[in-house]
Amino acid sequence: MRLIYVLTAFLLLTGKSFSQHQEITAKPEMWKGVKENLVDTNSILHAFKNGTVNGHFRYFFMATDNRKGLTDFYANAVGGGIRFETARFKRFQFAVSGFYSFNIGSSDFNKKDPVANQGSRYETTLFDIENPNNKKDLDRLEELYLKYHLNNASITWGRQLINTPFINLQDGRMRPTGVEGVWLVTNKERKTRWEGGMLYAISPRGTVNWFSVGESIGLYPSGLNTDGTKAGYPGHMEVKQVSILGVKRDIGKNKILQFWDIWVPNVFNAAMMQLDIEFP
């Protein structure tokens, strides 16, 4: 089986281009060209008037070319979004963004291969994996948050985009994974940098709705148990929130040590430690 996919992304209003992928160490700059407004204005009206507006456009073609005798699939998706962020007012900032996707010509996702009895596995993730036939309601409120700036940190509450080793954008389709909760980030210029918070809702890539943490576990294929039976955890996860904490420390020239921990109550706890060394 061969997968063929092409993504073309353009920044509207800024005139710059960007790719679909991002490094885990990079911030989720889904809206390239955004420059943080450091002005602390003296009124809410002034903060809105001096806000920043950004947008971008994306086109994605994907095709699955199976062996002779099996069914092939293809999809064409196009979409656009717009984002607005106010200037600072008494250390507060507000932001909102939304995106809309269109199915502009794809194979029949209702059709299953007669041999494997399976439909399209990859192409449906460009639209809505919950309802592959959804061609009208493909919009998503992506960001809606209030941010408060401290002297050396910021706290963001609401719907937002984050990039950590455990929960990240996975931006390989039309839309990335979004999260909702409270998130703290310290100043990136400091020698020791902290990042983390508590999340209580997630909108995985390839979906248009927002789900509780428990509901989001199992939206994608759940796999099999060791005895070959289908896993039964989807729809049975009593999880209200997930907590993540990360710390990065500059330990020498071109050397960064980082530690991350994620806790999903009643499910698991995982930790990782990583040493990055750059060679000029």
Image (cartoon, rainbow, N blue to C red):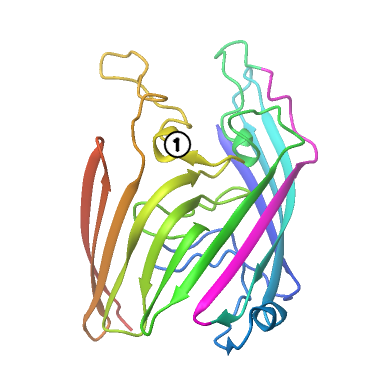
Q: Can you give x and y, in whole percent of width and height, for residue 251 in the image?
A: 19, 81
Badge 1 crowding class, 10 Å Cα cut-off, few under 14, some 14 to 19, many 20 or more, is: some
Whether residue 185 sits left or right of residue 47 in the image: it is left
Q: Which residues, given as a range, are shown in magenta?
A: 90-111
Q: Is residue 142 above or below residue 155?
A: above
Q: Quadrant of the C terminus?
A: bottom left
Element at label 1: helix
Front in this rendered view, residue 107 or 182: 182
The answer to whether residue 201 is left or right of residue 136 is left
Residue 70 placement (x, y as % from top left): 62, 19
Q: Quadrant of the N terminus?
A: top right
Q: Amino acid at mark 1?
A: Ser
- Residue at mark 1: 216
Front-lying residue, 184 or 206: 184
In the rendering, at what x and y percent does residue 31 appear?
62, 67
Please tell me which residue is depicted at 30% across the width and 84% down the height of the picture: 190
Instruction: Name above or below for residue 67 compared with residue 36.
Output: above
Residue 254 pos. (x, y %): 27, 82
Between 194 and 86, the one lying in front of the other is 86
